[in-house]
Image (cartoon, coloured by chain):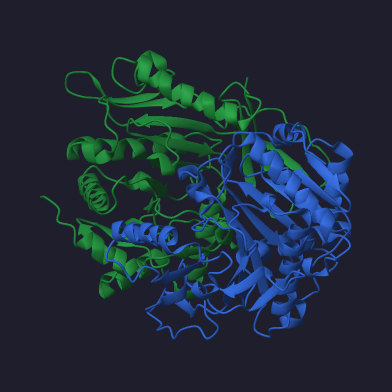
Chain colours: A blue, B green
Amino acid sequence: MQFSELRIDPIVGRQVFIAEDRAGRPNDFLKLEQSERAAVDAVAVVGCPFCAGHEKQTPETSYAVHDARGDWQVRVVPNKFPAVTSHGEKVVPTGLPFKVQPAIGAQEVIIESPRHISDIIDLSLEEFTTVLLVFRDRLRHWADDRVTRHALIFKNVGYAAGASLEHAHSQVLALPFVPRTLGEELQGARRFYADHQRCVYCQLLQEEIRQGLRVVAEEGPFVALCAYAARQPYETWILPTQHAAHYGQLSEVHAPSLAKLLQQLLFRLHALLPRLSYNLVLHTAPFEQNGDSAPNGDAVEPYYHWHWELIPRTTKLAGLEWGTGMHVNPMAPERAAAGLRGVRCEG
Amino acid sequence: MQFSELRIDPIVGRQVFIAEDRAGRPNDFLKLEQSERAAVDAVAVVGCPFCAGHEKQTPETSYAVHDARGDWQVRVVPNKFPAVTSHGEKVVPTGLPFKVQPAIGAQEVIIESPRHISDIIDLSLEEFTTVLLVFRDRLRHWADDRVTRHALIFKNVGYAAGASLEHAHSQVLALPFVPRTLGEELQGARRFYADHQRCVYCQLLQEEIRQGLRVVAEEGPFVALCAYAARQPYETWILPTQHAAHYGQLSEVHAPSLAKLLQQLLFRLHALLPRLSYNLVLHTAPFEQNGDSAPNGDAVEPYYHWHWELIPRTTKLAGLEWGTGMHVNPMAPERAAAGLRGVRCEG
């Protein structure tokens, strides 16, 4: 049995999904750990649920891309253990100052290959290009859902990044509201636009390319750069050089360049960081047709700029970070970028 | 050579300390890891720098409490590798949209025992009471520093919580501004006060005690409870039942109750979570005499309420958390509290 709700911190308004269940409500965390380990062992026995031939171990396919022989190449399925559901659950108010909402939304898993590979650098350029276009297609799908305001696409690779299954996959989280992180970006970008009549990301790109200090690589109309205020060593952003608010606008013509840039970036990171764990998160504008996109209801198109954020998980968040909301990064982004540029890539 | 600055994210304004150096500027992260390991090995060879008899391995003592025989019991020293300094460093503006500030502040280490113990449950009740009063004394010290607006006291225990040295210690971070997390709490608490003419924490305490669902234990004028919107399993807050904005107001009379409650809480957590790693963070009001305390310059005394937040590090932050700023907690706080209450404590 599942129990899921969206609780609001009574003081700061922080949203937390309380999503119990997965392990049949064990009595304590030790048992939870044990049943997680049991799940991993089960994979070893019955095989990886994401591999070709094991399709019955996952929910029904929602979307797929097939190769010339008719075999699936990329497969999208509902997440078996979602923190959100389409109907939400009835939640009972519990008195001042507590607030709770139904955990409404959808969660999908994008299985990126029928083969048991662990990272996207193991895909051919063509295969990874297809994956990037499936991300776009899922955004277009959720844009047509009238309840959904935003869909987050993200990827956890490696234990330190929170991954539970090894087989290469990404996730989609479709929500009926704009999540906090994106809301802050929209607010900041809107403020900059009001002050300078320009997209802040376009300004940033111009200055980054002029300075060259933090640029890792360019490929076609895309740039990879170490973030100016990187929270962790090697935090890298990948942006289109031409202004575009929605990743859903990505074209078949440009997708191969993006695929090449991302794969080369991961090749460089793997070369510098043995046992690389990372999170890759797509930042893209909310769906404007489904409500007011920005806090003030104006169109986000002129001032927001989609990008990927890749965060290798090299340092631990400690009391300082939890207590202040600030980060301490022991490696200057200029040095991280120089290190990444120094790695020799094939092709 | 050290390099430290406070960079501001160009879009959301997020503050990041870029603090290089600790390891003599290695060329890549692999080497950084190696030199961190070398530092740990050095401890094994030359001994723990925090143990009695090794005082020369740390900077000069800034403050200490001695026992009846004149030996130090708790020792405060400047952090050898601070991310902030009293003067800050000159920083060069680097063009729109980049912003940077000198990393001004102070960092101290509070060594909690001359003996090589790894957690505060290994201290006697009397010894730990002294530690809690040293925290208070350091806050009073920094309150008298005219530059400092806030001092954060925190503790990292265990590898997953970001601890680098095993010997029980806490840290002080004194800053010339109110850090983001506290700023959000002040804002939320002020809003609640305006709406309800009451401290939100006092209201929360009243409701928590009435419901009893999330209360772990009470001891004298203090309560430990699992947070209503806990970000991770077993996130626990410890609050005084009587309203007080400043931890600096803690009295010698009440400190033993707080020490007992915290030690019992840790005993319960250790019982449920083998290899417990945790962060413990003190949330206390900014120093009002050193500038406008609240964003609007009003006095925080009526609406803020000091408390400790203890976060066991049981789950990993993954792409969902990085991408949304939200958390997913797989264990309802009510169940966590019931588990903690179920642990038998001595005394």
Where is residue B333 shown, x and y percent of the image? Answer: 35, 66
Decide: is A72 above or below B142: below
Q: Nearer the viewer, residue B208 or A311?
A: A311
Q: Quadrant of residue A65?
A: bottom right
B345 vs A245, left or right, is left
Q: Residue at left 33%, top 30%?
A: B167
Where is residue A134 shown, x and y percent of the image? Answer: 73, 68
Task: Give the residue at the far front of this rendering.
Answer: A69
B323 vs B186, left or right, is right
Decide: is B64 above or below A130: above
Q: Nearer the viewer, residue A31 or A183?
A: A31
Q: Quadrant of residue A302?
A: bottom right
Q: Residue at left 68%, top 34%?
A: A332
Q: Quadrant of the N terminus of chain B?
A: top right
Q: Nearer the viewer, residue B218 or A132?
A: A132
Task: Give the residue at the far left of this rendering.
Answer: B347
Q: Quadrant of residue A189?
A: bottom right
Where is residue A269 shown, x and y percent of the image? Answer: 67, 40
Decide: is B269 above or below A251: above
Residue B243 visible somewhere in the drawing? no
Where is residue A285 shown, x and y percent of the image? Answer: 74, 68
Q: Nearer the viewer, residue A304 or B257?
A: A304
B223 vs A139, left or right, is left
Q: How many marks?
A: 0
Q: Residue at left 89%, top 58%?
A: A242
Residue B49 visible somewhere in the drawing? yes
Q: Residue at left 55%, top 47%?
A: B178
